[in-house]
Image: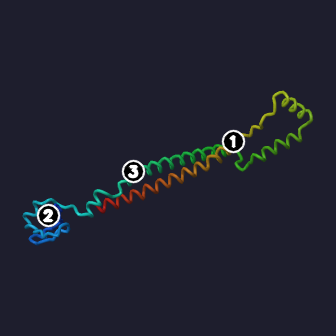
């Protein structure tokens, strides 16, 4: 039901409806009795916006739009990066298996095998290896590529899981913000 603003002599504006036409109202500001005009004259007065409409249209949750956009961006970036890391991990593992690598092999077993072969080598081979070390210096044993790849993949696993969680959290915030925006639009 529409309301109109009836001016009082004190400057206050009283909200009145068409059903109050022809009645007398007391001004809450000054206490003077104010006559409400007829319906025809009420239409010429300024229209009052009800408090509920004013709160819905002017206020509300204006921050939901940017939150939804940012969370959508975070969700897309996080899930995309997690997907990339998963693809990279899967590609390395499939390549290693196709080339006959034993994924259960451990680097400590590899070094133990080197040590065992050194202990079983002939004295002449040991002498040659000793001379090479004196001339070239002691070198770090270079593990096979499989162990390098395994170390790399193990170092990237926490990053992949964190990206996945960030992406899922961003998607969840986006869906909640979108739901709240839809609820706000339905109320308005």
Quarter holding residue 184: bottom left
Residue carrying label 3: 66
> Which class describes the residues within 10 Å of circle 1: few (<14), some (14-19), or many (20+)?
few
Name the residue at 54% across, 50% down: 163
Q: Above or below — where is 115 with respect to 37?
A: above
Residue 57 appears at what percent x and percent y? 28, 58
For the C terminus, which image quadrant? bottom left
Task: Locate residue 21, reporting x and y percent.
Answer: 10, 69
Asked if the residue at tag 2 contacts the one at tag 3, i.e. Cβ–Cβ closer than 8 Å, the answer is no
Residue 124 higher or lower than 113, as above or below: above
The residue that appears at 14% across and 71% down in the rendered structure is: 25
For marks 2 and 1, the one nearer the N-term is 2
Q: Nearer the viewer, mark 2 or mark 1?
A: 2
Q: Is residue 160 left or right of residue 179?
A: right
User: Cα distance, mark 1 to mark 3?
Assistant: 43 Å
SS of the residue under disc 1: helix
- The dot on residue 28 is none
Tag 3: Cα neighbours inside 10 Å, few (<14), some, or many (≥20)?
A: few
**Residue 2, picture quadrant:** bottom left
Q: Earlier in the sequence, mark 3 or mark 2?
A: 2
According to the picture, the residue beneath numbered tag 2 turns out to be 8
> In 3D space, how far apart are the residues under numbered discs 2 and 1 (Cα atoms)?
86 Å
What residue is at 84 percent from the left and 27 percent from the top?
Answer: 135
Q: Quadrant of residue 182?
A: bottom left
Question: Which percent across, then down, holds residue 157?
Answer: 61, 49
Q: Nearer the viewer, residue 91 or 108?
A: 108
Helix, strand or loop at mark 2: loop
Q: Which residue is mark 1?
A: 148
The mark nearer the N terminus, 1 or 3, is: 3
Check the image and name the residue furthest to the right. Answer: 123
Quadrant position of the N terminus in the picture: bottom left
């Amino acid at each position: 039901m529409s309301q109109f603003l009836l001016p009082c002599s004190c400057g206050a504006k009283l909200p009145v409806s068409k059903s109050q036409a022809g009645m007398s109202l007391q001004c809450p500001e000054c206490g003077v009795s104010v006559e409400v005009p007829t319906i025809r004259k009420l239409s010429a007065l300024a229209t009052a916006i009800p408090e509920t409409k004013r709160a819905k249209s002017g206020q509300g949750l204006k921050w939901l739009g940017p939150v939804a956009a940012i969370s959508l961006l975070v969700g897309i970036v996080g899930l995309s990066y997690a997907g990339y890391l998963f693809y990279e991990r899967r590609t390395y593992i499939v390549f290693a298996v196709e080339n006959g690598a034993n994924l259960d092999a451990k680097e400590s077993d590899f070094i133990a095998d080197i040590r065992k072969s050194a202990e079983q080598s002939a004295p002449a081979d040991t002498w040659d290896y000793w001379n090479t070390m004196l001339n070239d210096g002691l070198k770090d044993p270079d593990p096979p590529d499989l162990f390098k790849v395994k170390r790399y993949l193990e170092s990237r696993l926490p990053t992949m899981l964190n990206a996945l969680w960030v992406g899922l959290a961003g998607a969840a915030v986006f869906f909640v913000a979108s739901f709240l925006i839809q609820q706000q639009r339905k109320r308005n």
